[in-house]
Image (tube, grey):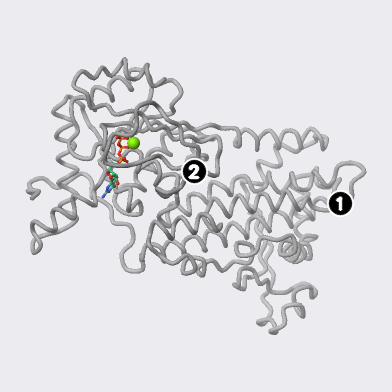
Amino acid sequence: MVSLSFPLSPPPPPDESAWLFSAFPFPFQFGGIFRTATMEIQEVDLREMGSLIQSRVILEVSNQVQSLLESVETTTLEIAVTGESGAGKSTFINALLGLNDGDPRAAPTGVTETTFSPMPYEHPRLPRVHIWDLPGTGTPRFQAETYLQQVGFERYDFFIIIASERFRENHVKLARAVAAMGKRFYFVRSKIDLDLQASRQRRPTRFEEVHVLREIEADCIRQLKKEGLDSPKVFLISSFELHRFDFQCLEDTLAEELEGHKRHVLLLSFPSVTTEAVQKKKASLRRNIWKKALMACFFSALPGLPFHLNIPMLLKTLDSYRRSFGLDDDSLGALALTTSKNPSQLKNQVSSTLARDLSENAVHVILSQAATYGKVAARLLKDRVPFLDNLVAGGISFVAAYYLLHTALDNFAKDAERVLLAAYDLEDEFQKSVFYPPEPGFIFD
Ligand SMILES: Nc1nc2c(ncn2[C@@H]2O[C@H](COP(=O)(O)OP(=O)(O)OP(=O)(O)O)[C@@H](O)[C@H]2O)c(=O)[nH]1
Ligand SMILES: [Mg+2]
């Protein structure tokens, strides 16, 4: 890692303009937090850039970086959600998409059967991600192979099979047929909040949540084994409380079992309901920062154009980061509705400048700060990425853009964690999860 560290100056005077453009070294104020003026370009980024850029002409490199970015942006993810009627498929889909029932983009839910043919629901931010609501599997004459042909099994990346009570023969038949067709399946036991509520009512004095959860899981596994599955894994979920139980574990498992670009898209598309998910999303977005920063330079460094960064492109990237972390007004509003919070209460948790006011002006302020010491970083950078030697001004722009995106991502992630804590009242208890494997011998009441 190339790291340029500058000494910290004393805290700035109250008037920002008095220090903001002062000579280096200076402290940065970004998102209301003073940071050391440290520029870090990660070793992994330098290696990737170096190998791509060595001795290529600018347009060739720019095309290649562009196509690397596009290959992420054009990656599709098709998720099938299936199970018996009323199991909670549509509710789960809406929770995954961060949509409330009243939203016209949401899947209809209710106590009467509502899903009769495969229905794709487009992700509100990622048009190439669809979650498919499949018809129920509950009829006695259910034929798994015919069903899979009817719902067009080839198009899906994986299947989520949901049950709200017992797993039955049909679920297992379906899982087997899915596997035989070369696809993965995951069992989700839904409506866990209802089970806990019922158990608490039955045994108010002896109720212990973790034991009840273990027993539900053990019971599901028993049922699946009885139907002949070897080592089934079941994720316990409440669509009304995704931040609890096994949702994070489900996301981790899905991500682990998907290949590169699809993994990235899955991490971006799932709602970040735990701090762990926020960090994973950040890490996934971070991997493309150098490409985005270079593209912003290339556009401005093309012949005939002055050397300056492509601000609209940077704004677009920042906006996509902000939305990815659910910090835009729409996402905060939807989360407030789901968690019965006042939208302003959640909005108040967002403190970084760019998340609150994503304007060209705010971007320029941060770029000017970075450009002041960008000269030093650019000199270091060109040893490793010689191409930037021909483009000193571009090199400085690159460092500035890299710094901007990097710092914004960090601050957006911190904002997202604060929003989470406030939305789910997680100060005391954070992410309760089921212990696995279950302890034998406990009687679920
Ligand atoms: N408490 C609770 N209720 C849920 C949960 N998931 C779904 N429900 C309720 O269960 C009922 C059925 O949910 P749906 O999502 O419509 O079920 P579905 O599987 O899509 O049903 P069909 O479309 O008919 O096949 C609705 O009243 C939901 O509100 C959950 O996690 N917790
Ligand atoms: Mg439905």
Q: Earlier in the sequence, mark 1 or mark 2?
A: 2
The one of 422 and 291 positioned closer to us in this rendering: 422
Task: Say if disc 1 is inside 8 Å of ligand 1.
Answer: no
Residue 309 in the image, given as x and y percentages of width and height: 79, 52
Distance Cα–Cα, label 1 vs label 2: 35 Å
Disc 1 crowd rating (10 Å Cα; few below 14, some 14-19, many 20+) is some
Residue 384 in the image, given as x and y percentages of width and height: 73, 47
Residue 78 in the image, given as x and y percentages of width and height: 46, 31
* Residue at far right of view: 304
Q: In percent of the image, x 59 and y 36: which residue is there?
A: 72
Q: Amino acid at mark 2?
A: Ser
Q: Secondary structure at mark 1?
A: loop
Task: Say if disc 2 is inside 8 Å of ligand 1.
Answer: no
| Marking on residue 307 | 1
118 left or right of 331? Answer: left
The one of 354 and 195 positioned closer to us in this rendering: 195
Residue 347 in the image, given as x and y percentages of width and height: 51, 66
359 left or right of 334? Answer: right
The one of 318 and 132 positioned closer to us in this rendering: 132
Q: Nearer the viewer, mark 1 or mark 2?
A: 2
Q: In percent of the image, x 60 and y 72: which residue is there?
A: 32
Q: Amino acid at mark 1?
A: Phe
The one of 192 and 44 positioned closer to us in this rendering: 192
Q: In percent of the image, x 76 and y 36: which residue is there?
A: 61
Where ligand 1 lies, by quadrant?
A: top left
| Marking on residue 269 | 2
Q: Is residue 281 above or below residue 93?
A: below
* Residue at far bottom of view: 13
| Marking on residue 127 | none
